[in-house]
Amino acid sequence: MQNDIQLAQDNTGEVRQVLRTEVLVVGGGPAGAAAGFWLARLGHDVIVIERKKFPREKTCGDGLTPRAVKELGDMGLTDQLSQFHRYEGLRATAHGKALELKWPTHPIYPQYGYVVRRRELDMMVARNAQDAGAKLLEEHEAVAPIIEKDCVRGAMVTNKVDGSTIAIHAQYVIIADGANSRFGRAIGTSREKSWPYGTAIRTYWKSPRHDEPWIESALDVKDRNGKSMPGYGWIFPVGDGTINIGVGLLSTFKNFKDVNTSHLLDSYAHMVADRWEIDPTQPECKATSGKIPMGGSVGPKVGNTHIVIGDAAGSVNPFNGEGIDYAYETAHIAADVLHDALLAKDSEILKRYDQIIEEEYGQYFKVARLFARIIGRPVLMRELSRVGINSRTLMEWVLRIMANLLRPDELGPAEAAYKAAALIVRAMPDA
């Protein structure tokens, strides 16, 4: 079915455009573009609307984990991805020590990742969706949902270039407009405020070490007074002459709202300046920051005719703040569910999305949320990082768990430790 385009008049007499499609995707970031790709690939008529024009900046560490690399490969982007900086694993630092840890082996996921600036990554995935047949409307913003009989049936969309209004009618709508999801809130989603969330800030520096084969994570980030903070610092070599340096902070720290993240980033940049050969006073651009809902904390994720995915659904790993891989994965799941619903002409099938998300991530995110609460206590964080940095074996287990690379085909120490933690949280109130 092709997009049905006709002209209509609103009650002011102004002529506007009306589009009709099978699926409307609100948001063209990682989740939205991936959903658009898979739906188009499955033969469906899909429109993706994106508020900004590609390429555009996003606050992110720019690191792609093996899970994200696998999803990008499934979308046919392996060759394009190989043009960017590949890295082999994680260098963990704490208490003056460092451990270099290769990505663990896994039967499904590769043993490497990439560092790709979001302005390039998101444009690549969005153009890939276009090539598959999705219609992409850049510089268009969904300003209000179209509701018919308690069902979301599209959106009123503003063209940000000329200010005109478009009504896009759809059988189904995917909400993928990111962490603050205005469109999601407009249809009734909300964040579970008692659950942990994070905030992150980052910018770029020139460095001769820009092509190192390791991303780096500091487990002992300190503020200007040398006080331990419940979060982590990162350094991701971009391979283009620059490195991405940032800090992430968890809301489980009791004085979380009093922390000046700009000062924290400045402290961290000074802390690593000599090793990474940077001038901490001369970043390449102004630092940007963002709030990160985590652990599936946003819901409901399914309505009669809509599905919420990616950051808009809080699909971010509380263990490490990683969200791109879960954006791609939830997009893929949502596209498959909508494909079945469209073929069967049965909207009840959308309920499967909730079931699949719970099976895939429910228990894991609950364990991760509990972990986030534990490390919100600086004394515990200090002790855990001290023990971990002195044991390669322990840190290899921790990396496998935190990156969600647990093996389905064998029960090693990491899998056993995770299963034990899962048994504990199962008996606890929700974290």
Image (cartoon, rainbow, N blue to C red):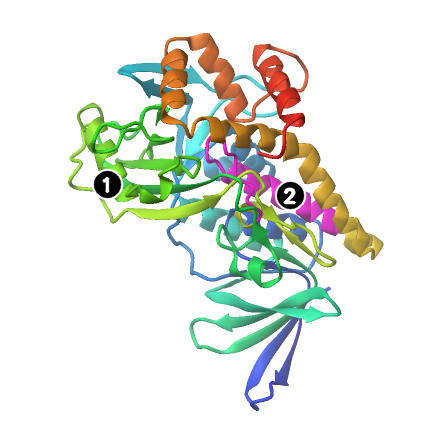
x and y, in percent, of residue 403 in the image: 51, 26
Residue under label 2: 332
Could you say which is closer to the camera, residue 414 or residue 27? 414
Instruction: Judge whether residue 317 is colored magenta.
Output: yes
Is residue 200 visible in the rendered structure shown here? yes
State which quadrant residue 241 falls in.
top left
Crowding near pointer 2: few (<14 within 10 Å), some, many (20+)?
many
Q: CA distance from mark 1 to mark 2?
A: 38 Å
Going by the numbered disc 1, the residue's amino acid type is His
State which quadrant residue 214 falls in.
top left
Could you say which is closer to the camera, residue 57 or residue 114? 57
Residue drawn at 21 percent across, 33 percent down = 224
Residue drawn at 25 percent across, 27 percent down = 209
Nearest to viewer (mark 1 / mark 2): 1
Q: Secondary structure at mark 1?
A: helix
Is residue 3 visible in the rendered structure shown here? no
x and y, in percent, of residue 114 in the image: 43, 32
Residue under label 1: 263
Q: Is residue 396 left or right of residue 301?
A: left
Going by the numbered disc 2, the residue's amino acid type is His
Q: Secondary structure at mark 2?
A: helix
13 vs 252: above or below = below
x and y, in percent, of residue 32 in the image: 56, 52
Q: Is residue 341 left or right of residue 136?
A: right
Bounds of the magenta span? 313-339
Residue drawn at 47 percent across, 37 percent down = 81
Crowding near pointer 1: few (<14 within 10 Å), some, many (20+)?
few
**Which SS does the magenta portion mostly show?**
helix
Instruction: Judge whether residue 32 is colored magenta.
Output: no
Specify which label sits upstream in the sequence, 1 or 2: 1
Q: Is residue 140 left or right of residue 356?
A: left
